[in-house]
Image: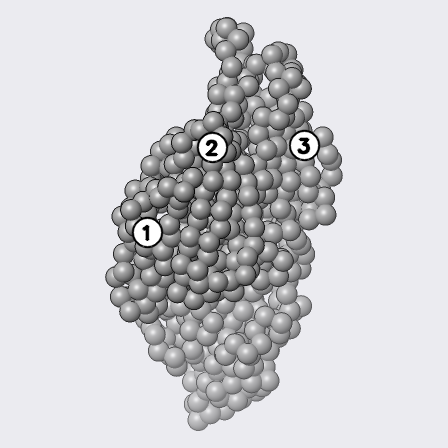
C-alpha cells in the first residue's frame, strides 16, 4: 500500500517578504509518484485590531454625517470582530493593486528541481506569469468555481457573498464566525513542473533530489472586504458585457442588500434588531427583502457593522423624545456586532418584533441597541422612529500576509506497486524564460533565438495595459495585430488581427485561436477556455469574477525540432502605445 510522506522545508520560521526562499530535500532510496505530490503552504493573515470608523468612512455619505450624535468604535461592545480578508496582488513595485484574479501558483515566482545524479531537471523563471496565464486557458469556468473554496485569491461567482480561506463563516444562528490562522494553500507540483507528471520517480537511480522555490510574498495584498457600494448600499451580481460601442455594461441584479426597514414604536422598538429591506427609497424602507437561500445572506454572525440611521420624532405626539439629544433629521452613527442572524423559513415567530411572519426575511440581531439613550427608556415611543437605515461592514487592520511553514507531500510507492522500468530514460518538457522591456512604440519588431529542442513558444505581455506597470496577467491593451516568422519564413499568410479592447463587435482572427489551440495541445494541455476576456476583482463591492472588461493575450506558436537554434521574428502593431514588457516562454524537450 502506498503511503504519503510530508517533507518539511529546510528553512524554518515564518516566511515573509524578506525571508522568501524555501527548499526541500527528497531523500534517495525510494520510488515516488510525483503526479500526486503537492506543495503545502500554511498561511496566515492575522487580524490586529478594529479600525476607527473615522478612518474608514470619511467622505462616504451618510456614514460621515453624524449630526453630532455618534458613538466611538471603542464603545462598540462584543470584542474583536470577524473579518473576511480580500486577497489580491500588487503590480510590480508593490504599490498599485492589480485587480486580476490569479491562481494559487502565482505565489511561487521561481522554482528549480535538481537531482544528485542528473543535475538540473527543471528551472522555471517567472513561474507566476507562466502558470497564471496558461491556467486561464486550461480551466473550465465551472471547474474554477467548484475549486474556488481552496483558492487563496478567493473570488465571487454570480451573486454569491464572498468567502475566504481565513474565515469560518456562519450566516444563520447564534454560533459566531471565526477568524482563522494557519490555513493550507495546496499547489500540485505538476501545475508548476512538467517533470512532476512522472508517476514513478526512482531516487535510487537519480539520487537525492532538491526543490528550491522563491515565493513572491511581497506581491500578496491583504485588506478587509467592505460590504457595500459606496453610498447606495448595493451588492451587484457583476456587470453585463460591454456593448458594441465599448461602453461599460450595467450592474446585474442590483440587490440593495444594505438597507434595513424602518424602526418604530411597533416594529423593532428595542432597536436591537434590523431586518433587510427591499425598498430602493432613499428616505424610508418598509418592505422586507426576501432571500431565497440562506447561503445568499450577505452578512454573518460575529461581523461588525457600521450603522447609519436618520432619527425622526413627532414633538406633538411625544415632546419628551427630544431628550434623546437629537434633532429630527439627524443621522445616528454607531458600530455594532451581529450576534445572531434569523432566517425565516415560513415560521410565524422568526424575525423582527412587528414583522415576524415574513417568509425568507433576514433579521440581524445586534449586541446592543443602535440607540442606548437612557432618557424615557431605551425603546422607541409613539411618534419616534429611525428611518433610511443603512449598514456597511466595519474594517480592521490586518498584518501582512505570511507563510507560517512550508512542506511538500509526496506519495511513496510500496515495493509491490513499483513497475520495472529497465533503466529507460524519462522524457519531459520544461520552459526557458526570456523577459525584456522596451519603450512603448506603435510598431514593435524584434528577433529572438529559440533552442534547437524548442517545440512551443508562448508570448505574453505581463503588464497593465493602462499604465504599463508590470503584473502577472497578460493583457492585450492596444495591440491590434501581430505576425511571426521562423527562420525568415512566415508561419501565417497574413498579419493576425485581434479584437478591439473596447468594441466587442470586432472579432479576433480565427487563426489566432487556432494557432493557440494547436500550441496548447502540442504541450499536452487541455484547451478549455478561449474567451480571452479578462477576469478581475473590480472593486470592494463587486469582488467578483464576472467583470470581463479587458482582453487577455496569449500568443502560441508551434516550432519544429531542428539541429540548430531557431530565429523567431515578432512584429506587433498597436493603435497607440504598444507593449513595454514581453515574456517569452520556450518549451523545450529534455530527458534524463
Residue at point 50%, 34% (across, down): 565
Q: Is residue 19 visible?
A: yes
Please count the marks in the image.
Answer: 3
Q: Which residue is mark 1?
A: 496
Viewport quadrant of the C terminus:
top right
Q: Earlier in the sequence, mark 2 or mark 1?
A: 2
Query: Residue 402, position in %: x, y?
Result: 65, 46
Residue placed under numbered mark 3 in the picture: 23
188 over 310 or under it: above or below: above
State the CA–CA distance, disc 2 to disc 1: 23 Å
Q: Is residue 102 visible?
A: no
Q: Against 189, is 286 above or below?
A: below
Q: In the rendered image, which quarter is residue 142 located in?
A: top left
Tell me the number on the disc at residue 454: 2
Marks 3 and 1: in contact by CB < 8 Å?
no
* Label disc, if present, on residue 174 of the rendered structure: none
- Viewer-closest of 586 and 294: 586
Q: Is residue 33 left or right of residue 280?
A: right
Q: Nearer the viewer, residue 294 or 541?
A: 541
Q: Secondary structure at mark 2?
A: strand
Q: Quadrant of residue 83?
A: bottom right
Amino acid at each position: 500500500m502506498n503511503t504519503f510522506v510530508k517533507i518539511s522545508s529546510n528553512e524554518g520560521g515564518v516566511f515573509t517578504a524578506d525571508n522568501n526562499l524555501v527548499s526541500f530535500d527528497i531523500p534517495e532510496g525510494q520510488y515516488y509518484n510525483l503526479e500526486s505530490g503537492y506543495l503545502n503552504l500554511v498561511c496566515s493573515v492575522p487580524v490586529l485590531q478594529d479600525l476607527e470608523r473615522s478612518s474608514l468612512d470619511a467622505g462616504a455619505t451618510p456614514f460621515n454625517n453624524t449630526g453630532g450624535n455618534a458613538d466611538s468604535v471603542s464603545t462598540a461592545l462584543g470584542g474583536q470582530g470577524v473579518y473576511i480578508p480580500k486577497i489580491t496582488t500588487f503590480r510590480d513595485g508593490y504599490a498599485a493593486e492589480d485587480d486580476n484574479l490569479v491562481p494559487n501558483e502565482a505565489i511561487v515566482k521561481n522554482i528549480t528541481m535538481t537531482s544528485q545524479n542528473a543535475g538540473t531537471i527543471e528551472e522555471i523563471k517567472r513561474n507566476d506569469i507562466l502558470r497564471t496565464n496558461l491556467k486561464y486557458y486550461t480551466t473550465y469556468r465551472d471547474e474554477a468555481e467548484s475549486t474556488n473554496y481552496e483558492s487563496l485569491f478567493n473570488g465571487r461567482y454570480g451573486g454569491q457573498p464572498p468567502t475566504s480561506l481565513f474565515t469560518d463563516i456562519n450566516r444563520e444562528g447564534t454560533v459566531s464566525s471565526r477568524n482563522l490562522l494557519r490555513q493550507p494553500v495546496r499547489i500540485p507540483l505538476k501545475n508548476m513542473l512538467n517533470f512532476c507528471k512522472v508517476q514513478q520517480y526512482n531516487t535510487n537511480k537519480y539520487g537525492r533530489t532538491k526543490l528550491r522555490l522563491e515565493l513572491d510574498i511581497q506581491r500578496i495584498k491583504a485588506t478587509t472586504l467592505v460590504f457595500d457600494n459606496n453610498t447606495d448600499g448595493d451588492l451587484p451580481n457583476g456587470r453585463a458585457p460591454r456593448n458594441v460601442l465599448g461602453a461599460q455594461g450595467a450592474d446585474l441584479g442590483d440587490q440593495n442588500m444594505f438597507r434595513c426597514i424602518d424602526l418604530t414604536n411597533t416594529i423593532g422598538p428595542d432597536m436591537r434588531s434590523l431586518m433587510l429591506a427591499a425598498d430602493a427609497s432613499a428616505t424610508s424602507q418598509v418592505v422586507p427583502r426576501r432571500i431565497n437561500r440562506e447561503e445568499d445572506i450577505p452578512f454573518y454572525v460575529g461581523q461588525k457593522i457600521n450603522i447609519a440611521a436618520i432619527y425622526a420624532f413627532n414633538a406633538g405626539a411625544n415632546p419628551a423624545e427630544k431628550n434623546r439629544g437629537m434633532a429630527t433629521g439627524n443621522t445616528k452613527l454607531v458600530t455594532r456586532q451581529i450576534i445572531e442572524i434569523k432566517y425565516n423559513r415560513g415560521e410565524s415567530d422568526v424575525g423582527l418584533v412587528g414583522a415576524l411572519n415574513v417568509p425568507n426575511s433576514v433579521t440581524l440581531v445586534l449586541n446592543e441597541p443602535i440607540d442606548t439613550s437612557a432618557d424615557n427608556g431605551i425603546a422607541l415611543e409613539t411618534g419616534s422612529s429611525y428611518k433610511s437605515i443603512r449598514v456597511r461592514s466595519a474594517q480592521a487592520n490586518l498584518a501582512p500576509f505570511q507563510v507560517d511553514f512550508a512542506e511538500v507531500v509526496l506519495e511513496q510507492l510500496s515495493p509491490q506497486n513499483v513497475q520495472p522500468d529497465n533503466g529507460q530514460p524519462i522524457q519531459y518538457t520544461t520552459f526557458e524564460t526570456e523577459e525584456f522591456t522596451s519603450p512603448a512604440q506603435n510598431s514593435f519588431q524584434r528577433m529572438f533565438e529559440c533552442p534547437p529542442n524548442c517545440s512551443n513558444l508562448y508570448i505574453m505581455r505581463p503588464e497593465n495595459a493602462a499604465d504599463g506597470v508590470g503584473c502577472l496577467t497578460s493583457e492585450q491593451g492596444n495591440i491590434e495585430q501581430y505576425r511571426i516568422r521562423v527562420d525568415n519564413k512566415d508561419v501565417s499568410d497574413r498579419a493576425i488581427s485581434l479584437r478591439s479592447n473596447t468594441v466587442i463587435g470586432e472579432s479576433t482572427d480565427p487563426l489566432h485561436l487556432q494557432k493557440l489551440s494547436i500550441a496548447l495541445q502540442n504541450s499536452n494541455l487541455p484547451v478549455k477556455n478561449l474567451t480571452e476576456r479578462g477576469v478581475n476583482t473590480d472593486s470592494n463591492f463587486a469582488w467578483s469574477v464576472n467583470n470581463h472588461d479587458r482582453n487577455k493575450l496569449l500568443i502560441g506558436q508551434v516550432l519544429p525540432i531542428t539541429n540548430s537554434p531557431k530565429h523567431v521574428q515578432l512584429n506587433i502593431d498597436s493603435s497607440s502605445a504598444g507593449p513595454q514588457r514581453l515574456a517569452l516562454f520556450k518549451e523545450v524537450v529534455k530527458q534524463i
